[in-house]
Amino acid sequence: MLLYSVLLLCVVLIPTLGIKRVNSVEKYFNVCRRDNPKIEDCVRNSIETLRPRLVGGINEIGIPPLEPLQIPEIKLEEDTGAIALYSSYTNISIHGLSKCEIREIKIDLENNYMQLKVHFPSLELNANYKISGKIMMMPLQGEGLCNGNFTDVDVTSFIKTGTDMRNGKEHLTVEDIGVNFEIGSTSVNLDNLFNGDQDLGSAVNKFLNENWQSIMTEIKPTLEDKMAHIIKLIAAKLFETFSYAELLPP
Ligand SMILES: *[C@@H]1O[C@H](CO)[C@@H](O)[C@H](O)[C@H]1NC(C)=O
Ligand SMILES: *[C@@H]1O[C@H](CO)[C@@H](O)[C@H](O)[C@H]1NC(C)=O
């Protein structure tokens, strides 16, 4: 779930990659010109300038508040053999996304490709959860509050763009998007497992915390897909709001 938040952060940042300086766009971003030989540095500066505004979000261009990031609902269904799990999370809030460090930006306009690596020192997630199934033979069932802390989260995302014409103007489109993340350490707690059975509940929480790496390996592809989807929605909204020439003036 944390991954989602991370992704969201990235999502928020990625659209800013398309930043430029034209009329209304300038209201939001420091614009970078396409022919800027140091476009990566320029974009990095734009993001840093934008950072304080990301905390509260920029509603009119589809960038959600980042601190905390709130996600109404995420459902995860896994059936990989080792894990057969149905879980849903509602009222999700993630703290720490705005404290990200940009580790690398790659922009290859000729090939319509951008890549962003971001590091989050620490993320905290809170949500209502509902879970049932099995993880590595361990039965899991419950409904309540969950809390998790994730440190040293590294997220790499790329976006490949295309263009189409809208109202006579060229707009970017999202052709492909991908997300990969790594987590340094994890600590989670699910409240009220097994209808509040204390012994079972703490045994399962202990199990989850001792085995989070193998569990994460199993659910990672699904989480990365969900994160990519969220980023895609945000990027698409940004590309719809501003034309290519507004975002990246020639
Ligand atoms: C959602 O979370 C917020 C803050 O974490 C809390 O104040 C609110 O009561 C929660 N809403 C529901 C429906 O659980
Ligand atoms: C996560 O961090 C918060 C704040 O430091 C702490 O209150 C909470 O107990 C931690 N949760 C877990 C599951 O470690």
Image: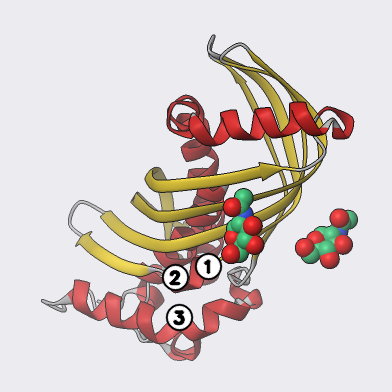
Vertical position of residue 79 compared to residue 45: above or below: above
Q: CA distance from mark 2 to mark 3?
A: 22 Å
Amino acid type shown at disc 1: Gly
For the residue marked with disc 2, what is the amino acid?
A: Ser
* Ligand 2 falls in quadrant: bottom right
Residue at label 1? 96
On whether ligand 1 comes within 8 Å of the CB at mark 2, the answer is: no
* Scheme by which the image is coloured: secondary structure
Q: What residue occupies the far front of the structure in this picture?
A: 199
Q: Which quarter of the rendered picture does the C terminus lie within?
A: bottom left
Depth order, front residue of 56/185: 185
* Mark 3 beta carbon near ligand 2 (under 8 Å): no
User: Tags 1 and 3 in contact by the CB under 8 Å rule?
Assistant: no
Please tell me whether residue 47 is drawn above or below residue 109 in the rendered image: below
* Residue at the far left in the pictured view: 37
In primary-sequence order, the first of circles 2 and 3 is 3
Q: CA distance from mark 1 to mark 2?
A: 31 Å
Which residue is labeled 3 in the image?
Answer: 51
User: Which of the two discs, 1 and 3, labels the residue nearer the N terminus?
Assistant: 3
Is the residue marked by circle 1 packed among few (<14), some (14-19), or many (20+) residues within 10 Å?
Answer: many
Is the residue 18 above or below the residue 143 in the image?
Answer: below
Task: Give the mark nearest the N terminus, 1 or 2.
Answer: 1
Q: Label 3 amino acid? A: Arg
Q: Secondary structure at mark 2?
A: loop
Please say whether residue 20 is visible from this viewpoint. no
**Residue 24 rendering spot, x and y as whole percentages:** 50, 87
Secondary structure type for disc 1:
loop
**Closer to us: mark 2 or mark 3?**
3
Say above or below: 78 vs 12. above
Q: 181 and 167: which one is in front? A: 181
